[in-house]
Image (spheres, grey):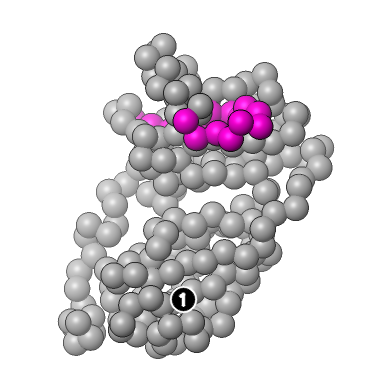
Amino acid sequence: MFNTRSKAVWQCVTLAVFLHLPLVGMAMAVYVEDKNGQPVANAVISLSAQSVQAVSANRTAIMDQKDRQFVPEVLVVQQGTEVTFPNSDDIRHHVYSFSPAKKFELRLYHGTTAKPVTFEQAGKVVLGCNIHDSMLGYIFVVDSPYYALSSVSGVANISAPDGEYTLSVQHYRSGKVYESLVRMPEQSKVVVTLDDLAPDPKNAQPTSELEALFQ
């Protein structure tokens, strides 16, 4: 759901833009909130358009494992990106995903011994560890090089060449993809309300007997 907020909200968004943008131009500021008007972090924002020529993007990324957590919790990559999964813990992990966008398994390992994984298909990939049930991570694969993650203040800054785009917003706690047509550079500020956010699944993860054995 896309809507217009108060002047005070836009002042905060505008301030965030100036604090985070480099000095080489402006970008669209996207403010993501929940149904109660609270900022939402780790929302995935992307711009896609067939009529605008895309720039080349970095096709390598890293999803680490530290303190029995995936770091970062949410990673956004473009289609065709190769992701490495180093294990920086002093215990072994067993990374897997059953998600339709990418099914894979990296059997028990530590260090940098696991082979990289290439993500060819757009979509949400949920990561888990067969040993530690409380470990959850997310890789969002997008079909555009123009993407960003919202900060803890709910703000994301995203740049793209002039033109009309489909603005898409996703979140791992939402079952929807929020979409709207926008035009750069005329629309410099957008508010997106995510009205279906579920409780964070990490807060409800039980500790399995297998995880207890490896603690």
Quick check: is 78 in the magenta stretch? no
In the rendered image, residue 135, in percent from the top left (x then y), is placed at 32, 68
Query: Residue at horizontal 59%, vertical 22%?
Result: 188
Spot occupied by residue 141 in the image (x, y as percentages of width and height): 58, 57
Q: Which residue is mark 1?
A: 86
Count neighbours of disc 1 (C-alpha within 10 A) and say few if under 14, some if 14 to 19, many if 20 or more.
Answer: many
Residue 101 in the image: state x and y as whole percent.
Answer: 57, 64
Instruction: Please indicate whether residue 50 sits to the left or right of residue 30 in the image.
Output: right
- The residues colored magenta run 19-35
> Residue shown at 62%/27% (left/top)?
26
Nearest the viewer among 34 and 53 is: 53
Question: Residue at point 41% right, 40% down?
Answer: 151
Q: Residue furthest front?
A: 23
Position of the C terminus by quadrant: bottom left
Q: Secondary structure at mark 1?
A: loop
| Callout 1 amino acid | Pro
Q: Position of residue 185 (x, y in %)?
A: 68, 23
The residue at the point 42 percent across, 52 percent down is 172
The image quarter in which residue 153 lies: top left
Residue 139 lies, with reference to residue 132, above or below; the image says: above
Q: Is residue 155 visible?
A: yes
The reply, left or right, for residue 214 in relation to residue 28 is: left
Q: Is residue 57 above or below residue 213?
A: above
